[in-house]
Image: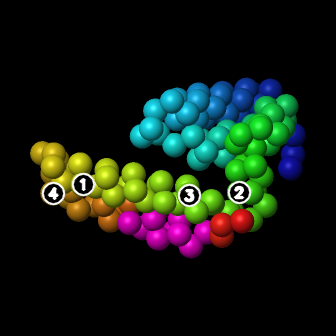
Amino acid sequence: MRPAGPVARLLWRALALVFVALGLLGAFLPVLPTVPFLLAAAWAAGRGWPALERRLLEHPRYGAYVRQWRRSGAVPRRAKWAATGMMALSSAVLLATAAPAVVKIGAPLLMAAVAIWLWRRPEN
């Protein structure tokens, strides 16, 4: 990969920080996932901030998930169940709102597609 220029490097770093911040929020808010944001942070950091990428890969709690994803696209079964449960709960709550019918139908269909994709991922 060609080295990024100073502006591109700054933009990659900013994006990585946004994803790290969202991942940090996810560590405290049960409705916001942590690991997907850390995966995205490692991806962005890999393009403009190698030191942050290394820290994410070596993180004592989340580093293994990032490494597994990079190695084989693996998602732990527990994470699959948690994501599927949250999508089902979100769909049920959405149906109880005054959202337009297209949203009440489209969002659960999109979440179902994501769940199918997720369950097709390897687990190790």
What residue sits right under mark 1 in the picture? Answer: 92
Label 2, secondary structure: give it: helix
Disc 4 secondary structure class: helix
Q: Which disc is residue 69 wearing?
A: 2
Q: Is residue 67 above or below residue 58?
A: below
Foreground label between 4 and 3: 3
Q: Residue at x 18, y 54 (%)?
A: 95
* Alpha carbon distance from label 2 to label 3: 15 Å
**Nearer the viewer's eye, disc 1 or disc 2?**
1
* Location of mark 3 (residue): 78
Residue 101, label in figure: 4
Frontmost of labels 2 and 3 is 3
Which residue: 59% across, 47% down?
36
Q: Position of residue 55 (x, y in %)?
A: 81, 34
Spot occupied by residue 65 in the image (x, y as percentages of width and height)? 70, 51
Dot 1 or dot 3: first in sequence order is 3
Residues at circles 4 and 3 in contact by the CB criterion of under 8 Å: no
Q: Is residue 89 above or below residue 61?
A: below
